[in-house]
Amino acid sequence: MLFENVLDVLAPAVLDVRHVGMRYESREVMRDIHFALTAGDFVSIVGPSGCGKTTLLRAMAGLTEPTSGSVRFKDREIREPQSEVAIVFQDYNRALLPWRTVRGNIALALEARRIARSEHPARIADLLRRVGLTRHADHYPAQLSGGLQQRVQIARALAQEPQVLLMDEPFGALDAITRQRLQDELLEIWSATSTTMVFITHDLEEAIYLGNRIIVLEANPGRVAADIRVDLARPRHQLTTREDSRFLAIRHQLFGLLSAE
Amino acid sequence: MNARAAKAGRAAVFPLLLLGGWDGLARAHALPDSLSRPTTIVAALVSTVADGSLWAMAGQTLIAAAAGWALGSLLAIGAGIAIGTTPVVRSIVGPALELMRSVPPVALIPVALLALGLGPKLEILMVAFAVFWPVVLFTAAGVRSIDARLLEVARALRFGAAQRILHFVLPAAAATIAVGLRVAAGLALVVAVTTEIIANPSGLGYGIAFASTALRPDLMFADLFVLALLGFGVNALLVAAQRRLFAWARR
């Protein structure tokens, strides 16, 4: 107990999901979802379709207000989007401005934060380098592959310099190779910053590979079924990590939890 | 380059045949004299260009049409944004808009004549009125067609209403608004010339009406030719502008 308190002091909760419930008319989408995110955490959220994953993430982003309970960022209750909490949508092709180049799309977040124009070029160059888009700075989204477009959206979210980055199945629409590359790039970005990551996915292996914690939701209504620690060594490796016996054990556990319904 | 020249050559075949046939029939007195003859029309064209009267008339028409187009479009884009973004405004003014839109603008010339009297002010306001409707409809439709996800991105980035309109709504609607502006430009010339024929003694419209009453069909056709050229030029200009501005949409 004392040990837990010490941990709390060292790594206080950044995002606090408190007994969140959501109802659309007579349909109950989420019930009493309760957990807290520690600063610097990488949390994967998995669950069957209809468990309210996306609704939960939107509530954490301040895009939707829960019908009961609350989401708090540090001391504030989240009722509308916060500058410290960024979101990356799954549908990158709808979430980028098609009339702006890669550079312009990233600049959007800087404009939103009212950062002086004179600082834009250096910041954008840095972000482009971090997501590997330097060569594509002046391309329009429609000229880029899905993987590159999603990198633009991630760069735009990073331009917000968020403390929490919420991602809704960001790699769900990408092919396996591109997806693995982006997973590793995301882990690099995460280890280089202290950003707290929340990553929704329907891919169990992706959830284990990325996270140091997995929240498993069950459906109808969406509830927390399990909260699992992932004690796999970092940096992770696409082959060896996935072959690790602990990786496989967690995979079995998740599979059991999600096929039990 | 040769392909382009060949294309232009083919495009010229039909008009040249038409002119040749017209000239031949007129020489054979197979056509009424009121239709004049291409050769005399060219002569009239040359003489009016030489004495500057043609330039003056074309300039008057073009300036009045452009001024009315700009005024009407500006008001319409503002109204279209309000209608497209705000359901309340849409439900209040929508039905009235549909009713007003079905009044042919030309039918209002006598009314406007009573209120404003003869002159360029009348012409500009008539053009602005006619142009308003297509532009307001295209703008509202363009504004409403914006992807809901983009508006959510605007929300997530915490942009205010003005910034949201400037950075998201207007660019998203711009391609549709541009189509409305082109439709409006054609309409602007029509209404400008009509007003000149009926109520504002200036420009090409008055030139045509005057030539008709003066029994100078050659002059009349010379004016018509310039009017066609003007309409063609304005449209080509707007198409080129559209291509440049919306390069991102064609990739």
Image (cartoon, rainbow, N blue to C red):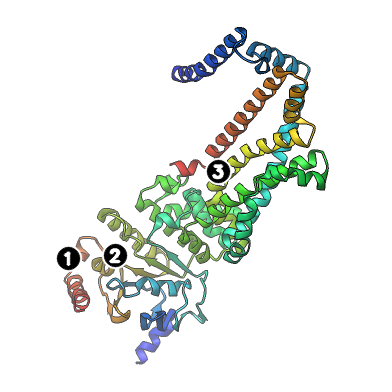
> Which of the two residues, B194 or A156, is positioned nearer the viewer here?
B194
Determine if marks 2 and 3 fall on one subunit. Answer: no
Q: Amino acid at mark 2?
A: Pro
Residue beneath disc 1 = A243
- Label 1 is found on which chain of the structure? A
Q: Secondary structure at mark 1?
A: helix
Q: CA distance from mark 1 to mark 3?
A: 58 Å
Relative horizontal placement of residue A255, taking residue A67 as reference (left or right):
left
Which residue is pictured at 52% across the width and 37% down the height? B243
The location of residue A256, given as percent across then percent down, is 18, 77
Q: Amino acid at mark 1?
A: Glu
The location of residue A155, given as percent across then percent down, is 44, 57
Judged by depth in the image, the label closer to the viewer, 1 or 2, is 1
Judged by depth in the image, the label closer to the viewer, 1 or 3, is 3
Q: CA distance from mark 2 to mark 3?
A: 54 Å
Determine if marks 1 and 3 fall on one subunit. Answer: no
- N-term-proximal mark, 1 vs 2: 2
> Which of the two residues, B20 or B131, is positioned nearer the viewer here?
B20
Assess disc 1: are there few (<14), some (14-19) or many (≥20) residues with their C-alpha within 10 Å of its C-alpha. Answer: few
Vertical placement of residue A121 versus A233, above or below? above
List the single residue furthest toward the top.
B28
Determine if marks 1 and 2 fall on one subunit. Answer: yes
Residue beneath disc 3 = B179
Q: CA distance from mark 1 to mark 2?
A: 14 Å
Vertical placement of residue A214 versus B42, above or below? below
Which residue is pictured at 62% across the width and 31% down the height? B231
Residue beneath disc 2 = A235
- Label 2 is found on which chain of the structure? A
Assess disc 2: are there few (<14), some (14-19) or many (≥20) residues with their C-alpha within 10 Å of its C-alpha. Answer: few
Please say if the residues under marks 1 and 3 sit with CB atoms less than 8 Å apart: no
Which residue is pictured at 76% across the width and 29% down the height? B206
- Quadrant where the C terminus of chain B lies? top left
